[in-house]
Image (cartoon, helix red, strand yellow):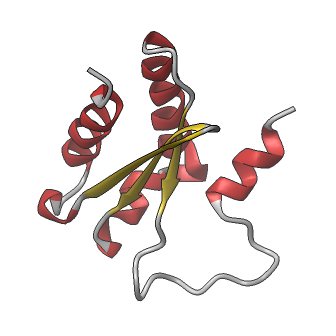
């Protein structure tokens, strides 16, 4: 079943958040692989990102393992909720920081 990655993400994220009814996951597939886009309640962003982004990194690592099992490259994008914190231009998003880490 090819949507195991989205089901896995749904299960993990809903277990972490206070507002599981607000969890939305969209899945797109292109030549780069699978992109899962996650949207959660603004109040739950801290739980999803974690201290220093560690929770988000762990979820991304687990998704890569699930993807490897299905011969797919799986990436996760976390949508900034509406009304979320305004970032200074010098601050990078988690996705930008993860791209910098890749060698």
Q: Residue furthest top?
A: 69
- In the figure, 26 relative to 73: above or below? below
Q: Nearer the viewer, residue 19 or 1?
A: 1
Query: What residue do we see at 26% from left, 20% from top?
Result: 1
Query: What residue do we see at 34% from left, 74% from top?
Result: 42
Measured as percent of width and height from the top left, residue 55 is found at 47, 42
- In the figure, 37 relative to 35: above or below? below
Measured as percent of width and height from the top left, residue 41 is found at 28, 70
Measured as percent of width and height from the top left, residue 51 is found at 53, 51
Query: What residue do we see at 46% from left, 29% from top?
Result: 63
Q: How many marks?
A: 0
Is residue 22 toward the left or the right of residue 39 in the image?
left
Q: Residue furthest right?
A: 103
Question: Which image quadrant for residue 21?
Answer: bottom left
Question: Which image quadrant for residue 12?
Answer: top left
Query: What residue do we see at 87% from left, 32% from top?
Result: 103
- In the figure, 36 relative to 78: above or below? above
Q: Residue furthest left?
A: 21
């Amino acid at each position: 079943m090819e949507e195991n990655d989205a089901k896995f993400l749904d299960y993990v994220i809903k277990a972490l958040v206070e507002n599981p009814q607000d969890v939305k996951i969209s899945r797109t597939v292109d030549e780069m692989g699978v992109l899962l886009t996650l949207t959660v309640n603004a109040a739950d962003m801290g739980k999803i990102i974690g201290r220093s982004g560690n929770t988000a990194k762990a979820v991304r690592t687990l998704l890569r393992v699930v993807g490897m099992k299905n011969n797919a490259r799986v990436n996760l994008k976390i949508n900034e909720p509406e009304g979320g914190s305004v970032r200074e231009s010098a601050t990078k998003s988690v996705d930008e920081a993860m791209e910098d880490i890749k060698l």
